[in-house]
Amino acid sequence: MRSVSEYWSSAARRAEPYAPGDQPGGKVIKLNTNENPYPPSPKVLSALREAVGPDLRLYPDPTAAKVRSTAAKLYGLSPEEVFVGNGSDEVLAFAFQAFFHQDKPIRFPDITYSFYPVYARLYQIPVEVVPVTEGFAIRAADYYRSPGGVIFPNPNAPTGLLLALEEVASIARENHGQVVVVDEAYIDFGGESAAPLVRQYPNLLVIQTLSKSRSLAGLRIGLAFGSAELIEGLNRIKGSFNSYTMDRLALTAAEAALEDSEYYSEICQKVIQTRTALLNRLEELGFRGTRSKANFVFAAHSHIPAKEIYEKLKERGIYVRYFPAPRINNYLRISIGTPTEMDALTAALADIVQHPHA
Ligand code: PMP
């Protein structure tokens, strides 16, 4: 295929699309896209079964009113302070369009979610990339007084490192007049959400997803919490793009999932326990991992290159994520699976480490 088509607009020519992790079919151990190893709540599945019926001929509620009020209750907010979108990737894309400017650079870390540079490029937002420390930590003060706003994940991806809530608050406080977007895709695996702070900081937008801790990656549900002013900004973009980004089944599942926090805290606890056990075992095998507060670990081996381990695992049907990017190209990001999957992983790793050139 030609690299540029004469039919493409300048946006299509400029685009450098995000490369998602492989979605292999068949019988593999899939630890490459941070899905939850446990199923959605039984209440979600039964609500979905009920929703499959004649009402599917009707359009869904374009305002997602029920989901917004259920989500608002989780953090003592009002429905006007909540936005619902088709996965948090969509909410992030809307936030770039609603709050960032083509003449003022935004800041994000050099090691972070690789979709941010993709959106910045597509929407022509200039960027000041801020290096994380040697140990991959985000330094809050580096983000103070950004010319055009700030975006970062907390915990960060793919490092899993968590920034303390006071530090998140300080970034919002020190960016008066600019929007600070905190992407909390992994917050339920060991962090404390900044959502309750949106009343105090009208420039703070907190984005979450039901893909990870609520086991619904397959249905595409993302949330944003922010001042009514910010939420209205997102609605202006959404209403200029697609009134019905959320289908009836996704809305039904989202509401049931947000109502069953008891089930989800239990599975998050299991993931956290498995993460601790995996990090210990990896250390015994010669890996050094970050102190991840997410549903993945980020680890490098003392002498075997990450790319080699990644390829050997793949040959054995075990998929993990490898990023051939500066500073992190000797690390693997491994999603937390079930204890049985972790046993298979660590057995394969033990074999690879013992026979590195086989
Ligand atoms: N933010 C971060 C940091 C992520 O890792 C992901 C998952 N790829 C997302 C957002 C998007 O998640 P989703 O669109 O499934 O809500």
Image (cartoon, rainbow, N blue to C red):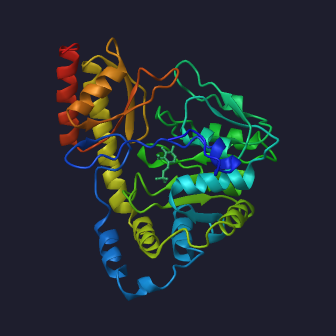
> Which quadrant of the figure contains the C terminus?
top left
- Which residue does the image show at 34% across and 42% down from the upper left? 272
Near-viewer residue (50 or 101): 101
Q: How many marks?
A: 0
- Is residue 197 something one can see in this rendering? no
Looking at the image, which is closer to me, 161 or 30? Answer: 30
The answer to which quarter of the image holds residue 308 is: top left
Relative placement, left or right, of 133 versus 23 is right
Classify 6 as above or below 217: above
Percent x, y of residue 74:
51, 63
Q: In this view, does 232 lie above or below 34?
A: below
Residue at 23% x, 14% y is 356
The residue shown at (43%, 38%) is 293
**Nearer the observer, 167 or 55:** 55
- For residue 183, above or below residue 282: below
Instruction: Decide: is 292 above or below 151.
Output: above
Residue 123, position in %: x, y? 70, 47
Residue 212, given in percent of the width and then of the height, sits at 41, 51
> Residue 224: percent from the left, percent from the top?
59, 58
On the question of residue 24 being in view, the answer is yes
